[in-house]
Image: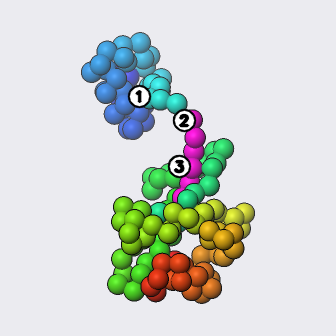
């Protein structure tokens, strides 16, 4: 049995990748192949797409990505999703800051410092005013 067969499937892929580059020659059977791919210098979560996020000291990462990241989005009356890739249309969203509260609700802080919970009709009204058209989160 090869070392790649004794480790988890995702680790086996990593092992094969390392082996093709000569980095896995010292992996013992039953060991988990670990390599350093880089250093994390900052970690941010953005609960609402295209709004400023929150700095984190740690996070849970699962099969869907960073837990709590981009779970919400601003939508306009046409169904378009708010995106910083279209600054003329959605640029003011970058003045809003978001975070996940202790009760797992998403809080949005507007540029004036006023904070609302995602799903609050008052948030939708204020974002609509900010963007100059009907918007909801």
As drawn, is 83 to the left or to the right of 100?
left
Of the numbered discs 1 and 2, the one sitting upstream in the chain is: 1
SS label for mark 3: strand
Q: Is residue 85 above or below residue 10?
A: below
Question: Residue 23's x, y, as percent?
Answer: 36, 17
Quadrant of the image occupied by residue 107: bottom right
Marker disc for residue 6: 1
Asked if the magenta segment contains residue 36, the reply would be no
**Looking at the image, which residue is at 50% across and 69% down?**
92
Q: What scheme was used to colour the molecule?
A: rainbow
As drawn, is 64 to the left or to the right of 56?
left
Q: Is residue 66 above or below residue 50?
A: above
Question: Residue 22's x, y, as percent?
Answer: 31, 15
How many numbered markers are drawn?
Answer: 3
Q: Which dot, 2 or 3, sits closer to the camera?
A: 2
Which residue in the protein does label 3 denote? Answer: 61
Give the residues in magenta: 41-46
Other residues around mark 2 within 10 Å, as few (<14) / some (14–19) / many (≥20): few
Question: Residue 87's x, y, as percent?
Answer: 40, 65
**Pick the front one: 92 or 22:** 92
**Looking at the image, which residue is at 38% across and 69% down?**
88
Of the numbered discs 2 and 3, the one sitting upstream in the chain is: 2
Other residues around mark 1 within 10 Å, as few (<14) / some (14–19) / many (≥20): some
Q: Which dot, 1 or 2, sits closer to the camera?
A: 2
State the separation of the CA atoms marked 3 and 1.
24 Å
Residue 29 visible in rendering: yes
State the separation of the CA atoms marked 1 and 2.
29 Å
**Pick the front one: 67 or 46:** 46
């Amino acid at each position: 049995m090869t070392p790649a067969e004794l480790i988890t499937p995702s680790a086996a892929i990593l092992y094969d990748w390392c082996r093709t580059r000569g980095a896995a020659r010292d992996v013992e059977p039953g060991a988990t192949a670990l390599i350093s791919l880089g250093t994390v210098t900052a970690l941010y979560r953005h609960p609402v797409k295209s709004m400023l996020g929150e700095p984190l000291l740690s996070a849970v990462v699962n099969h869907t990505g960073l837990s709590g990241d981009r779970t919400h989005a601003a939508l306009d009356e046409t169904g378009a999703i708010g995106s910083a890739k279209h600054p003329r249309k959605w640029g003011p969203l970058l003045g809003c800051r978001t975070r996940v509260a202790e009760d797992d609700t998403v809080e949005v802080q507007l540029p004036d410092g006023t904070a609302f919970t995602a799903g609050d009709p008052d948030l939708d009204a204020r974002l609509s005013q900010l963007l100059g058209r009907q918007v909801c989160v």
